[in-house]
Image (spheres, grey):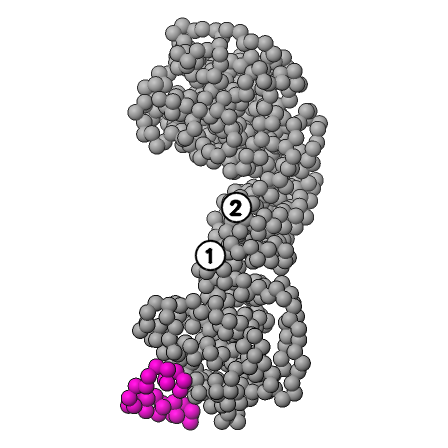
Amino acid sequence: MFSKITSILQHAVEALAPSLPLQEDFVYHWKAITHYYIETSDDKAPVTDTNIPSHLEQMLEILTQEERERDSGETGPCMEYLLHHKILETLYTLGKADCPPGMKQQVLTYYTKLLAHIHQPLLPHINVHRPVQKLIRLCGEVLAGPTENEEIQFLCIVCAKLKQDPYLVDFFLENKTKKPKPKDPGGSQMLKDNTLTLDTGQSLTKDLIDPQEESAAAAAASTFSPTTNNNSNNYNLVSSLLNLTRSPDGRIVVKACEGLMLLVSLPEPAATKYLTENAELCELLTERLVSFYKALPQSMDPLDIEMVESVNWGLDVYNLKEDAAVFTGKRALISFLSWLDYCDQLIKEAHKAAAAVLAKAVKERFFVSVMEPQLMQTSEVGILTSTALLNRIIRQVTSEALLREMVFFLLGEDGELETSPMSVHYPLRHRLIEHCDHLSDEISISTLRLFEQLIQKPNQHILHSLILCSLEERNYLENKPQEERETLENGQFHDAIDLEEDPLFGDEGPTDSRPPNSDWFSLSPLQSPDHPKNDVKTEVHKIVNSFLCLVPDEAKSSYQVEGTGYDTYLRDAHRQFKDFCGVCLHWDWRGNPKPFEKCNLDLPFFEGHFLKVLFDRMGRILDQPYDVNLQVTAVLSKLSLLPHPHLNEYLLDPYINLAPGCRSLFSVIVRVVGDLMMRIQRIPDFTPKLLLVRKRLLGLEPEGITIDHVTLLEGVIVLEEFCKELAAIAFVKYHTASSSSL
């Protein structure tokens, strides 16, 4: 109570007295702090019961006012006094001793506000960055300590200053081994060494040292024993932030993660070298990722995993009761995905060298060590859950370095040419592709979704490894010139659609919707020497109508249901193709197929394990569940959308002259249609049943009487829709190429 009355009286006197020059006022407040340590005999009273917080606040206000009143960048006498008399060194010592109790909190707050409010560069001064570095070491020592909030605020302002001026990071890398100084039993000499000596080791001249300041600091120093740091190559700022990421307070963890993200993005070579050579940060990322993953339930519904809302690290809102009511494990899943998002964003922001090291650590310590055994197991429940989780991980990863390492984990790094279905270059890749044709339809669907997600990622190695390496030599073609293709009347089938009049693809379409370098997207007829350019439109009409007319009329039902027309596929194909062009924009894909004369057509052709499984599945479309068929055709349509000339030729040209024993997507569908024509004859009332099944799938008819051959009928519907989709993709690719050449 007495101290509070004294403080009130002091402020009243100050208000009535004439204002002192800033420097005198600043020195007055500093001396008032040092006098406390000389005059007080009660070092157990908390600092909040003293005038120290008020004096520190006044000193900060004076420094701020001085800077406002002077030219930009000019150091005033108050700041000169603070630097010359090593005030920050003394405050650090008092804060470390926490004398009086709570002083550490006051010192942290003072440092934070000083760095935040003063605009002139302070950290380059040795009497600033040296005590700042020392104070950094005190942070994160005690988790959930009383000063944790002040510690993280202080560390974050230091990180922000380094982000603003990255060269300053060199001041916070201790590259030399420090030799411990002999202890001085008196304490006074030790404090002089710590706070009143220049870095050159020479003592300040006597006229610059205030004896009262020296006595005050010595009194504080007598309350603790000194410690020395003998570590070399130490980056204390990173270490302290890493310690605080283990805090039980979620807000502290988020702030610490923000600070680390700032530090990894610094371009300074010395800081990057530390981050790439020191394992602390890698261990934090991977150990926490592994622990969150292992906390997930052993069995989870793939739909729950897929449908859980998007997560952003740092914005994770906890509602344990509500999460548990949705599905078991939702809280654990969100925690895992949130930390994955942080790892991904950290690697994306990191310097390229640091990003590569961090991503490789995630691959080795999480994907290889933890996920691979889960994916290679024989338990169907385990396979299903781990595949769904991997699919969600693939969907979420956006950083180039982490995506690259994840792709190498899934598919291998070499991209060797597969010569037969039995060749196993990379066991995990082989197992995943086999799972696309698993006895369990659920596993097949989940794995097909995984590959659908994977082929849409911006990584060229995915497509080369899975598909393009098998098509590179074009040895699916007959090793002789193509025969003349059959010419139909007016170059069209009898029910051909006039595609050039489609309102979505008029010749006056906006030029900004055309992807650059569109010669990538030309279909093979545009490049074939057997078909001159003046025949291009006829060729495209033939290709489009080949797909549209592939399903016989008695097996078509979409024309009887509104909203299932070809124009819907045109719009979707246009949008999706534009997206794919953006993904593949900078890839070294040739505009035309590899010249025929340069292809090794004598090399035995194998479509590759992935396409083989897809074609096999497509060949069984009339006998597979509806959901499986939807997923198989979804993957094939995504592959058809890719702007590579060999895919255009192999997947979208019905007229390529296939070598003996080879198959293309069109030839697979032709065989399915042939099988369908024979089956139709054996099913009475085929067309009415087909229409009823379509309406039920669209929700236009309620479930009623049981219909026989429902799997076949559903397969026919998927087949019809898929052919329309392929026709739309072929036309969109043609239109993009022809528009860009105008």
Q: Can residue 457 be seen in this view?
A: yes
- Tell whether 425 sits left or right of 632: right
- The C terminus sits in image quarter: top left
Q: Can residue 337 be seen in this view?
A: no
Residue at (64%, 22%) from the top-left corner? 606
Residue at (52%, 74%) from the top-left corner? 131
Residue 6 included in the magenta stretch of the image: yes
Q: Position of residue 441 (x, y in %)?
A: 60, 33
- Tell whether 563 sits left or right of 277: left
Write the start and end of the magenta stretch as one range. 1-29
Residue 470 circle label: none
Q: Mark 2 points at which residue?
A: 399
Q: Which amino acid does label 2 sit on?
A: Ser
* Mark 1 neighbour class, 10 Å CA radius: few under 14, some 14 to 19, many 20 or more: few
Q: Mark 1 points at which residue?
A: 315
- Tell whether 229 sits left or right of 538: right
Q: Is residue 192 above or below residue 453?
A: below
* Secondary structure at numbered mark 1: loop
